[in-house]
Amino acid sequence: MPRLIKPSSYKPLTVSALPRKIGLPVSRWQRLLEVFLLLLAFAVLLWVTAVFSNRYALGVLSDQGEQRLNLYASSLQSGFEKYDYLPEMLSVDSKLLDLLNQPEKTSLVLQANLLMERLNAMAGTSATYLMDANGLTIASSNWQEDRSFVGKNFKFRPYFQTAIKGYKGRYFAHGITSQKPGYFISHPVLDAGEILGVIVVKVGIEDLEKSWAKTRPDDRVIVTDEHGVIFITSFKPWKYRSLYPVADEIRREIIKTRQYDNALIEPLSVRISEETADGNPILMIDQWRRARKPETGQYLVQSTDIGGTGWIIQLLSNTSSAKPIISVALLVVGSLFVVIFIIVLYVNQRRQVLHERWLAEQRAQAVLKTARDQLEDNVKQRTSDLTKTNTELRRQITERQKAEKELQNAQNELIQASKLAALGGMSAGVTHELNQPMTAIRSYADNAAALIKMDRLDEASANLKTIGELTDRVARITGQLKMFARKSVARVKPVSLKGALDSSLMQLMPRIQSENVAVIQHIPEGRIWVMGGIIRLEQILINLMNNALDAMTDETPSSDIQKRLEVTISKSDNFVTLSICDTGPGISAETMSRIFDPFFTTKMTGKGLGLGLSITLGIVKELGGEINAENRADVGACFHVKLQAAVEKKEEILD
């Protein structure tokens, strides 16, 4: 293809520089003052935006927190109140009354243990146990566990002391034996007005704390007792601590009753940061996380009482959730300020540009006229060059199409010549194959004439039927040769590979039989369809099988080796592989590297042109396939042809 060369006559476009900007002189101090005032206004605007957006964000956080706090409070109350009936119901059970009257009877102890174990599992409580009048646990739902309450004395617990006086007791404490916190509900067990013991139901809080912790991980939910001690919390490090210092006498009383086991009740590091418009404080609280490193969190505190318990549930909402609102407000206001500043700057610059534009237009008109003249000259010159180049390209394309057509014709003629050469090689066997039925036809015809003269019509009719069958055989042989010899059209469509193989074997059968070659076929059941043409497939098969037969002539390494022509067809994915193997001497390394070269042959002079495998390679590539050769491990060589598989048809499609 000719190269496009820029003509030397092209003239580069040149435009003179535009006039420099003209503006009024501004003093340095005046410009600095303008910048300072602009930055000051921007800072004040951002500060005002931050203050008002913070108030708004805290208001939204407060409204949301109020709703969540009510949900937390109701879940806490309902979680404990639903078990309030259990101790009173168990206190009238006859099995427990019998055990308190006869605590030494083992059978009654077992019945009571099983009863409480079953009820405890059904109710989903942490533990249920029965104490006598001295506070000794004589039966418990966890009687089979390592940390069983049986044999433990809990008379020092306030819930026992309240119930033994005849009242219903409610108490929260950390379990001394189980080492698990819980809410204890106690009730006296009466018999004829006499208090025999106390029944206690312990409700666990682990599930409640976990559900709170998962709801909003950044927030903190705490429940404090009447002394301000945190005993239920969604944040484990705050458990059994206080928001504010606890008096020493109260701390000593808590330790004495072991309400919170051995906890020291240390206060958290709390600082009041500010208050919201509705009076809720915002606290700064130090907390410990990974590797005991302190982290400070800022929380909006909202609280409500749990009626009848003296407890206060508090929701500490992390104010970091309000930061996105403040950031968005600052971003919007800052963006608006920048946009306004850009507009003002643009208007100012526009005034200067309009003044400069008038000065530049006069020079620009002259420059544009010169550039337009140069451009017209360049366009004319380039149009002329492109026209010449286009004409040359059309000529080359025409020549190339003509050459490709001649090449295709030559290739088709070469294929036809190869087929005719193959027909010449098969002529002796075909003549023999045709001579036999023709001789038989002559003999049967003579016999039929004699039988008709002797009025033996049935036997004459049988001879004529045999003559018809022999004529059909001759027609099949000549039909196959005619189909093979005619020129094929280079069309690719689904054809039966088995049909092409059977036709090719029929044409080569005289030679195969005369040379005593065994044909072994490894072919799956049913028809296998490939993309190609029946004549082109037969050309491939006959060329490869002729080569295999040529390899198994007198050049066979040992007469002990049986001559075998093995044909194998296999299918995988979208391809069908055809393998043709022989028991000849194999292919040498030198021959293997040139085996598909045109006019390369290892046969004696006059026995081959060296075009068979070259033509076969060309046909296989036209069909979108691959072909390769290899030596077998024991004896002989194999040719493998890989063709594209086609969708199966009801009938074989021929060219």
Image (cartoon, helix red, strand yellow):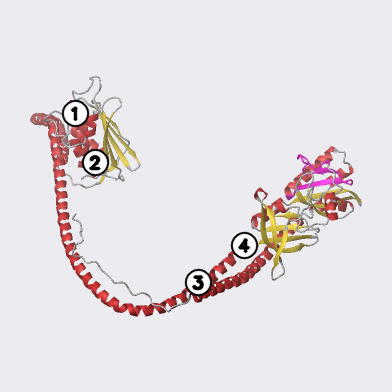
Residue carrying label 2:
620
Q: Earlier in the sequence, mark 1 or mark 2?
A: 1
Contact between labelled residues 1 and 4, with CB atoms less than 8 Å apart: no
Residue type, mark 4 in image? Ser
Q: Quadrant of residue 234?
A: bottom right
The picture places residue 270, in percent across and down from the top left corner, at 73, 59
- What whole-number distance in Å separates the C-alpha atoms at marks 4 and 3? 27 Å
State yes or no: residue 130 in magenta.
yes
Residue carrying label 4:
321
- What whole-number distance in Å separates the C-alpha atoms at marks 4 and 2? 71 Å
Contact between labelled residues 2 and 1, with CB atoms less than 8 Å apart: no
Question: Closer to us: mark 4 or mark 1?
Answer: 4
State yes or no: residue 482 in magenta.
no
Q: Residues within 10 Å of mark 1 (few under 14, many from 20)?
A: some
Does the rendering let one see residue 168? no
Task: Relative to 45, say whether 2 is above or below.
Answer: above
Query: Between residues 498 and 130, which one lies in front from this camera angle?
Result: 130
The picture places residue 200, in percent across and down from the top left corner, at 81, 49
Which residue is depicted at the point 88% across and 39% down? Answer: 104
Q: Earlier in the sequence, mark 4 or mark 3?
A: 4
Q: Earlier in the sequence, mark 4 or mark 1?
A: 4
